[in-house]
Amino acid sequence: MDEKTINRTKAALNALIDVEQLWIENTPSYNLSTQELVVLKKRLERAMENVSKIYEENRTKMQAAEEEVKKMHVGKKKK
């Protein structure tokens, strides 16, 4: 993976950590304030945007890797 993908992955994970922290701070009721809902929305959007970009930019590589793994498994099963 390239540096851009790694940075997007870190940003997505950090956004999800922020979401988790919101939930932790609001247990057991999970009643988020208006401000917390806005923060939640922004963090989720950030995570979704970065995950989508990571997926789209690496789709071909990931599909090729999947195919390679499938071929490896088929070869092992025939033995």
Image: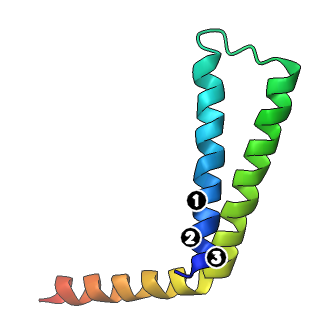
Left or right: residue 46 compared with residue 61: right
Residue bearing mark 3: 4
Residue 33 against residue 10 in the figure, above or below:
above
Q: Quadrant of residue 2?
A: bottom right
> Disc 3 to disc 1, how far (Cα)?
10 Å
Q: What kind of element bears circle 2? A: helix
Nearer to us in this view, 36 or 53? 36
Residue type at mark 3? Lys
Task: Kindly indicate whether the residue at mark 2 contacts the one at mark 1 (C-beta within 8 angstroms).
Answer: yes
Q: In which quarter of the image is residue 35?
A: top right
Q: Mark 2 points at which residue?
A: 6
Q: Which amino acid lies under the numbered mark 1 shown in the image of this protein?
A: Lys
Q: Calculate the distance from the C-alpha at mark 2 to the C-alpha at mark 3.
A: 5 Å
- The CA distance from mark 1 to mark 2 is 6 Å
The residue sitting at 59% across, 10% down in the picture is 28
User: Is the residue marked by circle 2 packed among few (<14), some (14-19), or many (20+) residues within 10 Å?
Assistant: few
Q: Do the residues labelled 2 and 3 touch (CB within 8 Å)?
A: yes
User: Mark 1 sits on what residue?
Assistant: 10
